[in-house]
Image: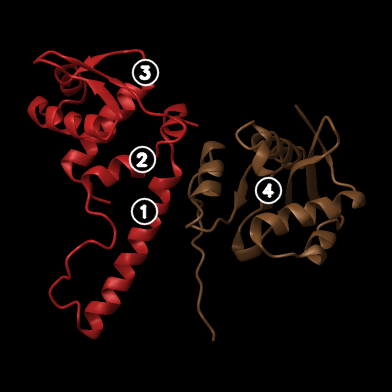
Amino acid sequence: MVTIRPVQATDLTAISALDARLTGVAKPDYWQDMLAPGRHFLVAETEEGALAGFIAGEIRAWEFGQPPAGWVFAIQIDPMLRLKGVGSRLFEALVARFKAEGVTRVRTLVDRKDHLILSFFRAQGMVAGPSLQLDKDLS
Amino acid sequence: MKLQTATRLGLYAVLELARDPGRTLSSADLAERYGVSSHHLAKVLRTLSVAGLVRGGRGASGGYRFTGNRRRITLMDIVALFEPAPGSRAEEPGEHTEIGAALQRVLTEVDEIAEATLSSISLETMLKGK
């Protein structure tokens, strides 16, 4: 069983380490910036006080012409604790916060080759959104 | 997106059987429910059986039941049994030209998005209907 709670500055080392382990890229400054006011940054903690996972997001309005919506920027779960509902608990907690602030939609961007995370968001009931992300190589 | 008939029948059969893994349905039962050819469906069920997704089907009225993992199997797993694998298609006439190659890049982009979508939807997610 895990507890979901808002992040504390003391969680950042464990968050950065988990993210670096899963993505291969350490980005402590990015996670530090995620503590900014207005962001929703939640952690799942085991009964022993270890980090089980985290989720980060924010409500954004009128970027790309889109009305206010909650955006999920990142979610990571300790691989040893996957398939136990930790991700779903974090997602539901973030969505509850978005709803409490009055938005009625939640969005995210996903690497289309990352079928694991795509499947997770699909299982939460998410479907293709109204926007298409476009990209160009500038090198 | 246009699916071959066998692919559509495969998806119907697997999803219907996975809805209640304890239930047994014959190809005739499934054909009647979806208004499709029982003969064609019987062939599709044999393919699904070889793939280990369903089991049964002995005799004309033999029933099938789902034997896969609803949380692990995605729509793409079923589609891949009946549609050509991505990248295995033969080169189309004109594809070697500049316009042909540009058109192919667009079609590949569409295929990649379709594959990502099908690969991300498990039978469990589909049947939850969230």
Element type where label 4 sits in the image: strand
Kind of residue at disc 1: Ala
Count neighbours of disc 1 (C-alpha within 10 A) and say few if under 14, some if 14 to 19, many if 20 or more: some
> With respect to residue B33, does A102 lie above or below?
below
Q: Is residue A89 left or right of residue B47?
A: right
Q: Of marks 1 and 2, which one's residue comes earlier in the chain?
A: 2
Chain letter for brown, please.
Answer: A
Q: Which callout, 1 or 4, points to the residue nearer the camera?
A: 4
Count neighbours of disc 4 (C-alpha within 10 A) and say few if under 14, some if 14 to 19, many if 20 or more: many
> With respect to residue B107, does A108 lie above or below?
above
Question: How many angstroms separate mark 4 from mark 2 (CA)?
Answer: 25 Å
Tag 1 and tag 3 share a subunit: yes
Number of disc labels? 4
Count neighbours of disc 3 (C-alpha within 10 A) and say few if under 14, some if 14 to 19, many if 20 or more: some
Q: Chain of mark 2?
A: B
Which residue carries the number 2 mark?
B75
Question: How many angstroms separate mark 1 from mark 4 (CA)?
Answer: 25 Å
Question: How many angstroms separate mark 1 from mark 3 (CA)?
Answer: 28 Å
Residue B114's tag is 1
| Coordinates of residue B22 in the picture (x, y in percent) | 36, 13
Tag 1 and tag 2 share a subunit: yes
